[in-house]
Image (tube, rainbow, N blue to C red):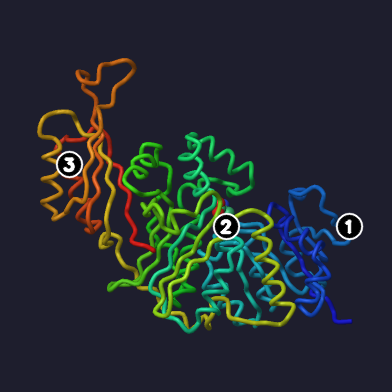
Amino acid sequence: MVAPLRVGLAGLGTVGSAVAAQLARAHDELAVRAGRPIELVAYASKDPPRDSSLDLSKARKAADPISLARDPGIDVFVELMGGEGDPAKSSVEAALGMGRPVVTANKALLAKHGVALARLAEKNNAALYFEAAVAGGIPIVKTLREGLGGSRIGRVYGILNGTCNYILTRMLEERLSFADCLKEAQRLGYAEANPTFDIGGFDTAHKLAILASLAFGSEVDAEAVHVEGIESISLADLDAADELGYRVKLLGVAQRTDTGIEQRVHPTMVRKGSVIAGVNGVTNAVALDADTMELTLIGPGAGGAATASSVVADLIDLAAERRMPAFGRAASGMSKPQRAAMQRHEGGYYIRLSAVDRPGTVAAIATRLAEQNISLESIVQRHRVTHGGEDPSTSAGPVPVILITYATTEAAVRKALASVEADGAIAEPPQLIRIEKHR
Ligand code: HSE
């Protein structure tokens, strides 16, 4: 009988509970796949398991995550507590420091300390695997780290946060408020403990920084990500986008440019009818442009069972003694990231303005854009905004004006809009959504 891989699991929330359940349910099949059984022998959790039906009677409860990480009775430490700080960081360091492999789903930890942890893992000859950290159930880490080892990747982009995609989809389809959709996402277990991480774009940024490192072989550089969330997206934007032939998605995009790696997270207009535009609800998508091929992976990006599937896949690799460096190359072989400035970003823009209702306003706005060499693809002026039962032909409210530009630069758009604001031509700050060229 081959010795089992003995698992110590820290964190029994949505994902941790699902991992424990999957190890028990698929015990025999996993043993066949991995060549030996994979057994949960110990756990640490400050709260009772999220799944109250879990049978943990065969596993020991450790006093805390660090003693679990150091427990001589385990072969691998699985960290599913989350958070960039302690106890996740110190317990992962404790395990790696003694040469013990670690499996984690912790994108915040990897985004902030990924390079240091990869170095520590390498120094102690310990594996550090994190398939579940990016896009939940989609095996994108393995795809980049191993499957695409022979390709040069130019851009990686996608929908990396299920909560945001769920909210944007539900708002448009059900005409629900942002707040109601967020509550539902939390109830369904998609959102982070602190949902600001989701809706503010930070969760996407963490995942993007990890993807960029895997794709470009550079050190994880989360500080370089330009981050905007979806808080300012209104139903008016989703409707206007729909009318103009677009959908709004929160995208993470990392691409090679002439000046370095550009990393950005922001609401993005994608063409209706495209693959990305059709990715709805909690589903994630990761698209890659490589010199050899274009590839899109679509699947569940959050939720217990799907994310647990990625954790268990890492455990199978460890049980079967399949070893890879954390980021697919020696930590010392990762290049120093060269950042591209967001101001140099090039692309089309959707701009929604609340124009002050007086003759010449729209012409003045067009002039300011022209001064920055910004060319307009379309311009839509709507009826005045009225309040209550006012007569729209006489009441003076702001007039919604929607502009779509041809490709220009971030700097040009920012300058033009600053002039429009200084002219007093608009009643509210402008709404700006970038348009991404995509498949
Ligand atoms: N809060 C995350 C999401 C969970 O909504 O995608 C998976 O990382």
Q: Which mark is residue 420?
A: 3
Element assignment for label 3: helix
Is 284 placed above or below 194 here?
A: below
**Quadrant in the rendering for residue 391:** top left
Give the x, y percent position of residue 100.
Answer: 70, 76
- From the image, state whether disc 2 or disc 3 is nearer to you: 2
Element assignment for label 1: loop
Q: What's the amino acid at mark 3?
A: Val
Question: If the image is split into quadrants, where does the N terminus sit?
Answer: bottom right
Q: What's the amino acid at mark 2?
A: Gly
Q: Which residue position is annotated with label 2? A: 301
Q: Earlier in the sequence, mark 2 or mark 3?
A: 2
* Residue contact between numbered discs 2 and 1, judged by CB atoms under 8 Å: no
Residue sitting at x 45%, y 40%: 172
**Quarter of image, ligand 1:** bottom right
Q: What's the amino acid at mark 1?
A: Ser
* Residue contact between numbered discs 2 and 3, judged by CB atoms under 8 Å: no
In front: 431, or 220?
431
Element assignment for label 2: loop
In front: 53, or 126?
53
Q: CA distance from mark 1 to mark 3?
A: 67 Å
Residue sitting at x 38%, y 60%: 264
Q: Which residue position is annotated with label 1? A: 57
Q: Is mark 2 within 8 Å of ligand 1?
A: yes
Is 149 placed above or below 267 here?
A: below
